[in-house]
Every structure is written in C-alpha cells, then in structure tokens.
Image (cartoon, grey):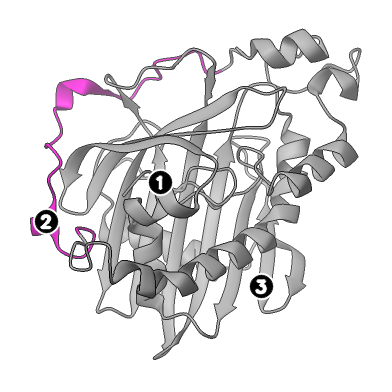
Amino acid sequence: MTSAFTVGVVRPATDEDVNVFRNMVDSIDGWTQVFNQKQTSVFIKKTENTSIHMIKVRSILSDIPAAVMYDVIHDPEYRRVWDKQMIEGYDICLVSPNTDIGYYSMRVFPPFNNRDFVTLRSWFNFDDTEYIVMNHSVFHASCPPRKNHVRGLSYLSGFHIKQLGPTSSVFHFVSQCDPRGNIPAWAVNRCSQMVAPKSVAKLAKTARLYPEWKKTHSPNLKPWLHPEQHTLRPINWADVSESPDFVVSEIVEEAAVARNGVVDDTGEASAAAGEAASGPNATEMSNVAESNGSNLSSADPLVNCGITVNGIPTGTEG
C-alpha cells in the first residue's frame, strides 16, 4: 500500500501509518538538535525528496492538558479568533469519520505572494491520553490554484500530544512543508529553526485561554471527538487526482519577480543573480519574521495540521 504521507494520495491513515509517525516522533536517528531551552527542543533532518528540511519540535506543557491542546488544534471557530495570518479556511469533504480534505490560504509578507494549501488530514484519539493529527497535500477539483497565490506543498505535517498528568502534556510537531515560489529553501530552513520555539509558546498561550472561551461558543460541538456531529459532504472520488493540478517546478510569483529579479525554476536564487534575486537576505528575512510575528509561509511549521501559528497550514479548518 502507498504511504499515507505521499503527496496526492487520498485515503485514511492506517495503524501502520500511525506507528510510522510515532517512530518519527520518538526517533533521534538522523536528527540534529538546533535548539533546547525552556522545555522546548527543535530538531532538523535532511531528506532526499526536497531541499526543505524536516523539522521536529518537542515541548513539555506543564499546565496544559493533552485534551485541551487537541481541541485547540481542531476548533475552526477558535482558530478564527487567534490566527491573524489566515485569509480563508474551510473543509471540502469527508473521506472517513476521521479523515477530511480542506483548503487553507494565508497572508505572506511582501514582496511574496500569499500561499494556499489543499491537504488531507487524519486524526486519532487513543483513550483520551494520546492524540495524533497528520496531513499532506492532495489535489481536489474544487480548489485549483488561485491567481495571486502560490500553492504550497505539505509533504507531511503532524502533531503528537500525550498526557503526562491531569494538567500536563508533551507536545510534538513534525513538518516538512514547501512554500514554493521565490522563497528560497535556505531562508525557509533558517526561519523554521528560529520561529518554531516562539510558535509553540504562542500556541501554548492560546491553549490556556481556550477552555474559558469554549464555555460560551458551542461547548458541546466537537465533531473531531464526536463523528456524528459532522455535516461535511462525503468525498466524490471523481474530484481527486494523484497528479498535481499545477506545474510543480513552475514559479509563478509576479510580485517577487518584479521586485527582485530572476529566480531559477527550482525556487533557488541563481548564482549569477546572487542573494538579492531571491528576496531579502538571511538577516533581513529574520528581522521580518520577528516583526511580523514570524509569518513567513512555511517558516513557521505549526500550520499544516489544522492550526496556523504564523505561517504554515496546520491542516485545514477544523
């Protein structure tokens, strides 16, 4: 069977896929630690399929129950409250009781175009003590590429949340997400490492406010826990394809090209053009990430599973 983490593959994740993801979370083989402070660690790993690094974040949340973090990741109404980068997000169809396809678009700082993603997401609740959410990019007829957006690719993004005590949890996030376009891989990789710890801190702050907010916002509505509450239409298999509905190697980002010059068809700045051709240099990119709440698309990996913390689709809406 084809891996559930393969771009374009539409099927619910299996027990085998869950075990592969668990091993990815727990393993240290091939991972390099790049940050370790205040109970949060960040690791990176190179892979063969893309120059974008895989990133893994681990954080001990001493005052946030695992169930609360899981709800925050899923709840689409709460996401609208705190996700200031989201332009639009909605669920498209239901593949199974615990798998859906959704659309997410987000603001990216100039001169780059906004990014959008279409992803398939599966989620699991194991005895209310362990939670997993995983996604990857797929192609759906109702969401072709949009003008003035660059369609990003999520190779894999996922959350693993495990209960430590009645009010504490350990939170893992793994992501390999390519924003494509004129944002060079070196900038995405550098900013990912910088932004990830702050993104976790922001997510944790958001989660602490959720229980009180939920009391007055449909407190019993949680379709991610109660499948009978789903109102999504079922998938029409004629609407999905394993082949991209865009040219993967093509760069269509007029705003960045007009300002910065030519970028080659891999998304990397050509040697002749130099760093200026690919947009801001590393220092400027880092400063922009700081001042904008780190909203570089895919520089903040906490987006491809259902939440967006400053710039990568964490799944979709809910």
- Inspect the magenta stretch and tell me whether residue 232 lies in it: yes
C-alpha span from label 1 to label 2: 19 Å
| Residue at x-position 81% and y-position 38% | 285
Can I make out residue 18 in this image?
yes
Identify residue for label 1.
315
The quarter of the picture where the N terminus appears is top left
Label 3: how many Cα within 10 Å (few below 14, some 14–19, many 20+): many
- Inspect the magenta stretch and tell me whether residue 18 lies in it: no
| Residue at x-position 49% and y-position 12% | 147
Looking at this view, is 160 or 62 the one in front?
A: 62
Instruction: Check the image and report above or below for 244 versus 229.
Output: above
Secondary structure of residue under mark 2:
helix
Instruction: Check the image and report above or below for 307 versus 61.
Output: above
C-alpha span from label 3 to label 1: 22 Å
Q: In the rendering, at what x and y percent does residue 81 appear? A: 44, 53
Q: Main secondary structure of the magenta part?
A: loop
C-alpha span from label 2 to label 3: 35 Å
Viewer-side label of 2, 3? 2
Identify residue for label 3.
40
Q: In the rendering, at what x and y percent does residue 282 appear? A: 86, 38
Q: Which residues are magenta?
A: 223-248
Looking at this view, is 48 or 246 the one in front?
A: 246
Identify residue for label 2.
229
Q: Amino acid at mark 2?
A: Gln
Instruction: Check the image and report above or below for 11 versus 227.
Output: above
